[in-house]
Amino acid sequence: MAWRVAVLMGGVSPEHAVSIRSGATMWRGLVSLGHEVVAVVIGRDGAWNQLSDSVTPDQLPEDLLGTPLVPHVRGDALSITVALKSLGVDIVMIGLHGPGGEDGSLQGFLEVAGLPYTGPGIPCSTVAMDKLWLKRILRDMGLPTSAWIEFSEDELNPDGFDSLLAKTESWIQQAGGYPVVAKARHLGSSFGVAFIGDAAALRPGLLKVLDAGDGLFVERGIKGVEVSCGVIGHRAESIVFPAIEIVPRAGWFDYESKYQPGGSLERIPAQISATNEARVRELALAVHCLLDAEGITRTDMIVDSAGPWILETNTLPGMTATSLIPQEARAIGWTLEKLLTRLLEIGFARSTTKK
C-alpha cells in the first residue's frame, strides 16, 4: 500500500545538518517504495518550510538558517501541520536529531495534532535524550554504566568554576584517575563532549562542555572496544541487530568520524568474544524494553575486560549513508526500504492502539 508520508528534518539543534542527511536518505527510500513524500525542513531559526513537490532530495541545503532556495511554503509549526493534515498525510517520519526533535516535545505536538509518527513515543524519547537521567535509571535498574559525578545548578554558575574544577579533580582521584569524559546532558552527534586524558586537559575540557549551555556531568572513561547495537520493534516483537564495532580514525568517535566517509572503520561482526556479543545484544534489548520504545533505539557501549558498559541510547539514530543502524540492518539482510517499512508499520500500530 502506498502512503503519503511527511518527512521532518533539519531543526534548531546542533545536529541540524546531520538531520538533513538523514531526511534525504529516508526520502529517497520512501520514494523507491512508491510512497508520496511531503518534505518539511525546519530551519535553524525554527521556521517550518514545506517543500514543493518539484524539489528532490539532492536539492536539500545541508545547513538552512531560514528560507530555502527552492520552491516552498514557509510558516510555523502550527500552520504547516494544518497544511499536512489538509493534504491527507498518513504519517510523519521524524528525521530530526537532538533537542526539539528527539526529546519528546515534537512527539507530543504530533499527538495533540492527531498525526501518527515514526519513532519512540514521548516518555522514551524524553528519558533517553537526557543522558544524566538515563544513567540514573540504568544504575537503579542494576544495568552497567560507568561511575559519574553530577553538579547542581548553583555549581554550574560561571562564577563558581574554580570550585567546580576542584570538586571534579577530587572526584577523579577517588574514582581511579584519568581518562574521564565530560558531557552535556542532551546533545548528540558528539556535540558537547570532551574526552579528557590527563590533568592538563581538564580545565579546557570542562569549559568546552559548559560553553554548550546544556549542563554538565563527568563520567569515568573506559578503555576498551566501542560498539553499538540497534533494536527495532516494540517489546516481544523487537528484533536485535548485531553489534557493530567502531574504530574511529581520530582516536575517538567525534562528529567527523561519525559522518565523514572514511572517518571511522565499522566492523560487523564486532571484534569481541561471543559471550560479550551476546551480552551487548542482551543489554541493548533490555534498555529498549526498559524505555518501552516503539521503533528503533541504538545503544552505545564500551566493552572492556569486565564486559560491556552502557554509554547512552539514541531513540532517533542517524539514517545517513554512513550511519550505524543501516549498516547493522544490512548485516542481517535488511534493505533500507525494509527498515523504513517496519518503522512505518510500528508508527501506524501505535496510532491505532491509542484510538
Image (cartoon, grey):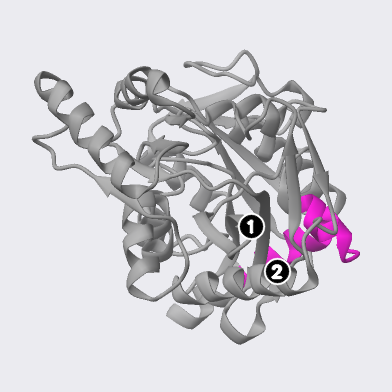
Say which amino acid is labelled 2. Answer: Asn
Magenta segment's dominant SS is helix
Say which amino acid is labelled 1. Answer: Val
The residue positioned 72% from the left and 53% from the top of the image is 325
Taking the image as shown, residue 76 lies to the left or right of residue 197, namely left
Residue 165 lies, in percent from the top left, at: 22, 27
Residue 302 in the magenta stretch? The answer is: no
Taking the image as shown, residue 224 lies to the left or right of residue 354, namely right
Q: Which residue is situated farthest in the top direction here?
A: 69
Taking the image as shown, residue 247 lies to the left or right of residue 354, namely right
Residue 319, labelled with which disc?
none
Residue 294 lies, in percent from the top left, at: 54, 70
Q: Is residue 163 above or below residue 170?
A: above
Question: What is the secondary structure assignment of the residue under circle 1?
Answer: strand
Where residue 162 sits, quadrant-wise, is top left
Comparing 271 with 200, the one in front is 200
Quarter of the image for the N terminus: give it: bottom right
Magenta stretch bounds: 326-346
Dot 1 corresponds to which residue? 303
How many numbered marks, from 0 up? 2
Give the Cα distance between marks 1 and 2.
8 Å
Dot 2 corresponds to which residue? 276
The residue positioned 31% from the left and 40% from the top of the image is 173
Comparing 148 with 103, the one in front is 148
Q: Is residue 56 visible?
A: no
Residue 141 lies, in percent from the top left, at: 38, 76
